[in-house]
Amino acid sequence: MIQHDNNKMYGTTILSIRKDKSVVVIGDGQVSLGHTVIKSGAKKVRRLSGDSVIAGFAGATADAFTLFERLESKLDKHPGQLMRACVELAKDWRMDKYLRKLEAMMIVADKSISLVITGTGDVLEPEDGIAAIGSGGNFALSAARALIDTKGISIEEIAKKAMKIAGDICVYTNHNRSDMSSKQKTLCTNFSNQPITLSEGRPCSSDTYDEKNDLYKDTKSGFDSNDSDIQVNDSTQVLLDDLPPQKIVKELDRFIIGQDDAKRAVAIALRNRWRRNQVPFPLRDEIIPKNILMIGHTGVGKTEIARRLAKLAGAPFIKIEATKFTEIGYVGRDVDSIIRDLVDAAIVLVKEKARKALANKALILAEKTIVNSMVGEDATEESKKIFRERLRNKEFENGEVSINVRESKSMLPTFDIPGMPGGQVGVMNVTEIMGKMFNGSKKTKTITVKVKEAREILINEESERLMDEDKIIKEAIDLVSNDGIVFLDEIDKIAARTEVKGEINREGVQRDLLPLLEGTTVTTKYGHVKTDYILFIASGAFHQSKPSDLLPELQGRLPIRVELKALTQEDLIRILKEPESSLLKQYIALMKTENVTLEFTDDGIKTIAEIAFTVNRQVENIGARRLHTVMEKLLDEISFIASEKNSEKFIIDSNRTSRAQKALLSLPSVIFLVRNVNSELAKSTREDVEEKVKKIILEHISKDVEKFNSSSKLSEHGADSLDAVEIIMAAEEEFGIEIPDEDAQKMETMEQIVEYINSKKG
């Protein structure tokens, strides 16, 4: 028990009970100075971290508020990690000369854990889910344990009864409390000793505002909420702790059809990041991510897999084409700009999280500004209260209000600095320069807008003002260095070695990429970024080149190779129907906005997939992207007249899709390409086919080349399974045909490949 100093004010008692996935925290309302009761309705329990944490204190009141502030800062630094935040606070409590003198204890809880932070800087977790502190803590604890197994009584009622018993026994604990329904399933902060409950549901709404204490009160339940700096966790992000590779693949399956090998590879790579963080130093520093090379046609899901992976992990992500870069010394972007762009993406990501974290406080300040603009700053508190209630009830949404906002920064163009690839400078006027010299420009302007627009403008402005820019930048650089994902597309385009004089040497770009993939430090305008632990996913179709054309050093830095299969007709049918945001669902939703109903029959869906597959096979294989072309052509007329067809229903069956098929295949460009492909194959003689196939094979084998003949097995000449796949893909590209996987697997010799191609000539 804390020893009392008669010159300090003390508050007691706090009780926490956890049962059946809910937790309640309750505190009495008494504050004492020595043996004198100073206040009987004090608030000792608060909600923190965006309503996800509740905390109550016992002991010296001033000391407790200091600890609340410290705990909030730790929760901001470690969002969603209550245990870690409390341990960090306890460390400071033990080691800091000032904090060691504080006389207070705290109970903190979230939906998964309850903790007691003692006056000696220890962090304790109660075994039975019940904890109590303060002068009446032992009495409340005993009563709660005695009542916990009573059937037909909620934990809120148990908490109230236990506190009443403690109040009957302890002179420092009173009975001052307000009532609350035992069915309440929201999180609210207590008034006096009203319990706070954490369970399923949304935060309670607030109706009135306490100007003095800068907090809202719920007049229906008698609760208030202190909106201090908070951290709101994004419910769409799943913690990596709960994401083994199987679950990652399952999450990707919701949006991407097939490509199981690629999904497994990226799932393992993501899980390895979590595993690395569990390894102690210094071995952790030696573990680097294994970069991935994806090989496959366009439109088979390479980019989507990487993008969904980054979203799942909440990591900064950037997709960049390798062909955008030039070797150092040429005019153009150098590869270091990849990291600079990734840092920019991370800052946007971190700012968005911070904006959500500050949403409640920004809303309070925004509403305060709007009310002051409506009634004037000199209006009475009663008038402000009335207008604030009406504002929160949306009574003024379409009315106009004048507000002062900061002038936006001039958006003047930027240009590259000559001789410094990737460096940019913006045009800045003299006013801005002088403003920055004198601690930034404070210029504001008055605008008149509707109330609902003013609220959004002010929330954004207040959020920006409340953000710690240095903290944002530091967190963004940290995020990039440890969790960044770079998707390097079209890497096959820089693999081919050119013999044309004067053309930019793409091999130099490969050499420039080497240090990024190996691990180096890149200087950005925000600071230095290490690339050692950034995950690089490279991809390419490799039609005109093969992975072995890449520099050996670059191949070594892409140790995991995954081949993505070409999409079959069945895959296209599944893509139309199964993903959560499938193309059919998108078009149905779009037409629903016009009150028009779209219905796709099974034979209609099958025909759509068949059209896309046929055009891909005969013209150019662009994978699932072909479905967009087919759907637009199919629904062109409906989309045009939808606004005039209110409440009508359109059924998309095989008859309607067949008409779209004729229209699509009658396009001049398609006819020309189909004829061109077919004529090229038709006019090829058997000798031509043999010569071209042999040339393709000789580029991929490495053993006993001089002994090779048409009946030799490819494996006898050093061709592995990946080489065999590359040979088949090159043959498909050369002759404009598609060889199904089941047929390709049977082809072991050049003779078999030639026979298959000739059979397609008819």
Image (tube, helix red, strand yellow):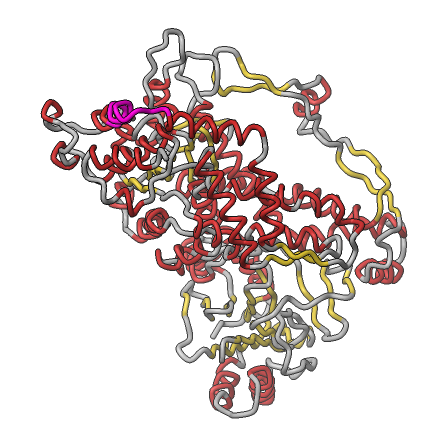
Residue 678: where, in percent of width, then height?
Answer: 42, 30
The structure residue drawn at horizontal position 84% and vertical position 43%, both measured from the top left corner, is: 449
Any part of residue 98 in sight: no
- Residue 550 percent coordinates (x, y): 29, 26
- The chief SS type of the magenta part is helix
Find the residue positioned furthest to the front: 762
Would you identify the image quadrant in which residue 349 lies? top right
Residue under the image location 31 percent in, 37 percent down = 759
Task: Work out whether 10 lies above or below 65.
Answer: below
Q: Nearer the viewer, residue 330 or 31?
A: 330
Q: Where on the picture, by quarter, is residue 396?
A: bottom right
Q: Could you tell me residue 700's position as x and y percent?
A: 22, 29
Q: Residue at x 63, y 67 (%)?
A: 202
Q: Residue furthest top?
A: 501
| In magenta segment, residue 684 | yes
Q: Residue at x 46, y 26 (%)?
A: 676
Residue 431 visible in this rendered orientation of the protein? yes
| Relative height, residue 237 to residue 409 (above, below) | below
* Image quarter of the C terminus: top left
Q: Which residues are magenta?
A: 683-693
Front residue of 656 and 584: 656
